[in-house]
Amino acid sequence: MLLIWRQGRKSAGFQRLALLAFAALLVLLFVVFAVARGIGNPKVPAGDVAIVEGVPGDLGTVTEAEYRRSLAQTAVQSGIEPLPKPGSTEYDTLREAALRGIFDPIWIRGQAAEMGISVTPEEVDEALGTLRSQSYKTKQEYDEYLKESDYTKADVETLLTTQLLSTKVQERIEDETPEPSEGEIEDYYEAAKSSKYATGKGVKPLDEVKPQIVKLLAEQAAERASSAYLRDYIDRWTVRTFCAADFAVVSHCSNFKDGRPPESNPACYEAEPEGGPPEVCEAPVPQVKPAQPGTVSPLSPEGQKLAQVPQPPGLEAAAAPAAAASSGE
């Protein structure tokens, strides 16, 4: 009886430990989720516009002075003069463009640093020389452009650095994309030979068209890798970007509250859209866009991707022949 009681106490102790471990796991998961969703964002200090975490040096602190300069430069580039009044639609559009112009270089430089990618002062000087020689006849013309655009030499060097880093990041992604395998090449050839490689004398052999197929598949793979990188890049840097309440007006901010999908139809948010309301409006939440059944093939490896919305008109009719064929009818 004593043994059973002791075993019962031991079992209860294990249960309590398991419950504590489970509770700790829930707390950990909540913290991870909270960080990913921007819950508990750090407070942006007074006088600053935003904080971007995980970037080199002091790049991550965006001051109101930097914002005002970006706003003025964006207005000049857009041909807007004088500066519109705060609260107007034109000002809001200009403000969003100015903020994107601030965040994009910070994100790219942060991403490049994480990938161990850098540019040298010599590379920047070379790019600056190329810009001046190709776009401006004289140094005086170049200097006048800087003055009119409210740009300094440091501003131009920052833009060129960002451009060079972006190019190197893209090249790294392409270099790390695997070459198409022999199986992929053969599958594509079998799927395409009757439509793409048939001639009056018959079908061209694989050896003859293989270089074309390799080039095409490599380009498709690089495009998929770039798309995957871009999605991950946007997600990673959005959750690291915390904006002051008055500046959380662009999707770069983790505390942005608009909720419109970036590819949404503007008519979905208009009271009286021209031409009537659209047939389909995407939900204001991130959506999975799976490939539609029957659309994936060696010729179209990504298939036709559609958001999970009510069935588009005509899809049922289009799918009927395929369904009948698969069922043997």
Image (cartoon, rainbow, N blue to C red):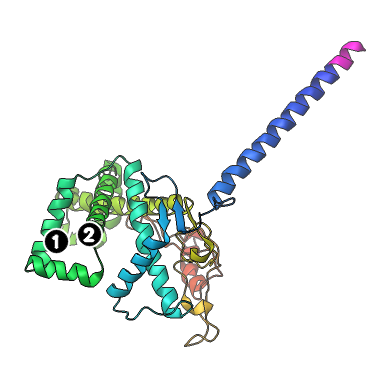
The spot of residue 69 in percent (x, y) is 34, 65
Mark 2, residue position: 156
Residue 144 vertical position relative to residue 88 in the rendered view, above or below = above
The residue at the far right in this view is 1
Q: In the figure, is residue 64 to the left or right of 310?
A: left
Q: Mark 1 points at which residue?
A: 131
Q: Does the magenta stretch include residue 90?
A: no
Q: What element carries label 2?
A: helix
Mark 2 vs mark 1, CA separation in Å = 10 Å
* Residue 102 in view in this figure: yes
Q: In which quarter of the image is the N terminus?
A: top right
Res. 189 in view:
no
Task: Give the answer, above or below, for where 287 lies relative to 3.
Answer: below
**Is 4 contained in the magenta span?**
yes
Q: What crowding class fits label 1: few (fewer than 14 Cα within 10 Å), some (14-19), or many (20 or more)? A: few
Task: Between residue 91 and residue 297, name the one nearer to us.
Answer: 91
Q: Which of 22 and 327 is in front in this view?
A: 22
Q: Is mark 1 on a helix, strand or loop?
A: helix
Please report contact status of discs 2 and 1: CB closer than 8 Å, yes or no: yes
Q: Earlier in the sequence, mark 2 or mark 1?
A: 1
* Residue range corresponding to the magenta coloring: 1-6
Q: How far across and how far down the image is residue 329, in percent?
A: 50, 64
Category of crowding for the residue at label 2, using alpha-carbon neighbours closer than 10 angstroms: few (below 14), some (14–19), many (at least 20):
some
Residue farthest toward the left in the current orientation of the protein: 137
Residue 109, relative to residue 322: is it above or below? above
Q: What residue type is disc 2 on?
A: Val
Q: Is residue 169 left or right of residue 207?
A: right
Q: What residue type is labelled 1?
A: Leu
Image location of residue 306, percent across then percent down: 47, 64
Which quadrant would residue 11 be assigned to in this image? Answer: top right
Magenta stretch: helix, strand or loop mostly: helix
